[in-house]
Image (cartoon, rainbow, N blue to C red):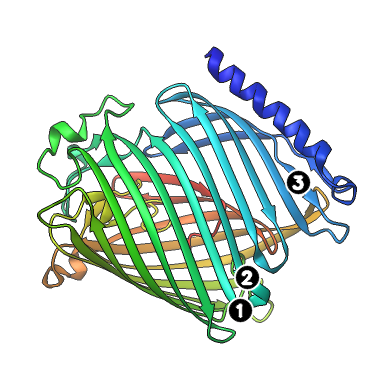
Amino acid sequence: MTSLRGRIAVVLVFLTATVIALPEHVRAGVEYIPIPAVSTSKNDGNDIGLIVPILGTDPDGELKYVVAPMIVHNSIVGTRGSLNLFRYDSGGRQIRFIGSYTEEIERRVELSYADPAFSQGRYSLNFGASYFKNATPRFFGLGQATSESNQTNYTGREARMNWRFGIHMNEVTQVAVGQRFRQMSLQRGATDLPFTVDEFPAIDGVQGETLILGHRATFYYDTRNNLISPTDGMAVTAYAELNQNIRNGDHPIYSRYELDIKKLFPSESKRAILVVRANLQATIGTQVPFFEQSSLGGQNNLRGFGIDRFIDKHLVSFSIEERIHLVRAKIAGASADFEIAPFLDTGQVFNDYKDVTFQNYRMTPGIGFRGIVRPNVVGRVDYGYSREGGAIFAGLDFPY
């Protein structure tokens, strides 16, 4: 506990230095907003604490910085201190840093940079790196028919690095190449559930350390009017990825493919926007680690189930939600829009395409609440209901 208090003190000192060091024209637009941090998650337990976002705007009211220290107590892993830094520049360029330290097991350091208009808009550039230990993941086995009673828990100890370089062929089309590195090992989790390694010793990826080097080519077609908070347009993403499982001498190569289609249908006033999404994923190869396969459940699909509730080689899913504008308000000198979004998610995972039947689809209706500071920031809370109860997810982006 003493170590945690020391880290929180460092966070507060760094926060003070950050605000003092801001340029004068930015400091003039700095606002503090203490917010209670209360949440619950199907896998991650209950949180209660305080977050103090500090928002910096330019003279025109555009959001430029968010500095968000947070301290919460979690019902599973104890007290967590964290610092979130976000910087937004013209052209959609973003820098993100997240650091956190928790009493029990969990750690996180994450840095990412994205510039969709690199070199005067001719290219896009993304890179990132992270290290974390997540003590609450669940695994139920592979396939659509897994039972909730088979639930196990593990700590995922991961290190990741990635880069992507894209060329804009025209205003709406981009092709990109990139690589990713993933180091993964399973350790005992923070819950009283059975340990995944003990219950599923024969599942690929469970035993020992896994090292993955992936090489990806991606095609983007995007007519949306904004990358982060769009109100109109369509986006199509298709990728093919060749992966090397470095520690697997028998079957080191497998491939993954995905087609993702999103379409927005705004009303004439744009106070209501219907959004539909279709997603198809395929994994080709043998002895593919379970955490590298397709999954349903979590904050971006089948939101009535916990993260990675269903896992298998292939996936098909469809989602629809109606984003309805409620009110616009001034917060910390910036204009914020608030929305309500009823939704329905459907989908299934499968090992072979002959196994796909409508009878096996899972469906999760739900409702979301959104706060948007255009064009850079989206905050959301979604509640989805399933036959296993319900799940609540929060994030700093739209689900799709």
Measuring from the top left, give residue 90's x and y in whole percent: 73, 65
**Labels 3 & 1 near each other (Cβ < 8 A):** no
Q: Is residue 299 visible?
A: no
Three-letter amino acid code at disc 2? Answer: Phe
Tell whether label 1 touches label 2 (CB within 8 Å).
yes
Instruction: Give the residue number, with chain letter if any, for mark 1.
Output: 122
Q: Tag 1: Cα neighbours inside 10 Å, few (<14), some, or many (≥20)?
A: some
Q: Quadrant of residue 17?
A: top right
Coordinates of residue 39 in the picture (x, y in percent): 52, 37
Residue bearing mark 2: 118
Point out which mark residue 55 bears: 3
SS class, disc 1: loop
**Residue at the extreme bottom:** 170
How far is mark 3 from mark 2, CA to CA? Answer: 25 Å
Q: Nearer the viewer, mark 3 or mark 2?
A: 2
Residue 121 relative to residue 157: left or right: right
Amino acid on which the number 3 mark rests in the picture: Leu
Compared across the picture, whether 299 is left or right of 72 comes to: left
- One can see residue 162 in this view: yes
Q: Residues within 10 Å of mark 3 (few under 14, many from 20)?
A: many
The residues tagged by marks 3 and 1 sit, at their Cα atoms, a distance apart of 31 Å
Q: Position of residue 292 (x, y in %)?
A: 27, 54
